Image: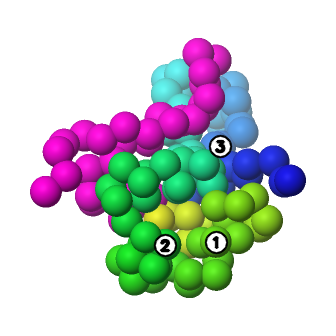
């Protein structure tokens, strides 16, 4: 079985350091762009379950093809960044909060508001 793939839905981080200023430029702060948003097949399955959506309903709501959803949730493929963005935004619009993987634990989801 394939390992869950993490899909970004925003541009990758700028890898240039704070010391890359050209002469005469004002010093940069230690501000970094936000981490890319991620979604895994397991998060997708869990979000669908919490919202009581079928794969067919998610495909219709998000515009991501049903077969693509099946393969992604089962770990058989990765998503293009645009498809990952569509899924994540569809879930967020329906009250799902994404918990991205960090040093405290793995990725997950929770509901921001009751489902109506």
Q: Which image quarter: residue 93?
A: bottom left
- Residue located at (30% from left, 41% from top): 111
The kind of secondary structure element at disc 1 is helix
Asked whether residue 75 is in view, the answer is: yes
Query: Does the magenta portion include 97?
Result: yes
- Residue located at (39% from left, 76% from top): 57
Residue 7 vs residue 10, the one in the foreground: 7
The kind of secondary structure element at disc 3 is loop
Drawn side of residue 51 relative to residue 78, left or right:
left
Q: Residue 25, percent across and down?
A: 55, 34
Drawn side of residue 6 relative to residue 95, left or right:
right
- Residue located at (64% from left, 77% from top): 68
Of mark 2 and mark 3, the one earlier in the sequence is 3
Drawn side of residue 63 relative to residue 24, left or right:
left
- In the displayed structure, 29 sits above or below 91; it is above
Q: Quadrant of the C terminus?
A: bottom left
The kind of secondary structure element at disc 2 is helix
Contact between labelled residues 3 and 2, with CB atoms less than 8 Å apart = no
Q: The magenta stretch spans which residues?
A: 88-116
Question: Of the numbered discs in the image, which one, if any, rests on residue 14?
Answer: 3
Asked whether residue 86 is in view, the answer is: no
Residue 11 vs residue 96, the one in the foreground: 96
Judged by depth in the image, the label closer to the viewer, 1 or 3, is 1
Contact between labelled residues 2 and 1, with CB atoms less than 8 Å apart = yes
Marks 1 and 2, Cα distance to the nearest angstrom? 7 Å
């Amino acid at each position: 079985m394939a390992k869950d793939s993490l899909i970004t839905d925003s541009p990758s981080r700028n890898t240039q350091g704070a010391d890359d200023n050209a002469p005469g430029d004002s010093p940069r702060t230690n501000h970094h762009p936000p981490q890319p948003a991620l979604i895994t097949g397991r998060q997708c399955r869990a979000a669908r379950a919490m919202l009581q959506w079928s794969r067919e309903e998610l495909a219709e709501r998000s515009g991501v093809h049903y077969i693509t959803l099946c393969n992604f949730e089962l770990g058989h493929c990765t998503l293009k960044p645009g498809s990952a963005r569509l899924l994540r935004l569809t879930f967020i619009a329906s009250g799902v909060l994404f918990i991205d993987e960090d040093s405290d634990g793995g990725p997950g989801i929770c509901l921001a508001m009751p489902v109506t």
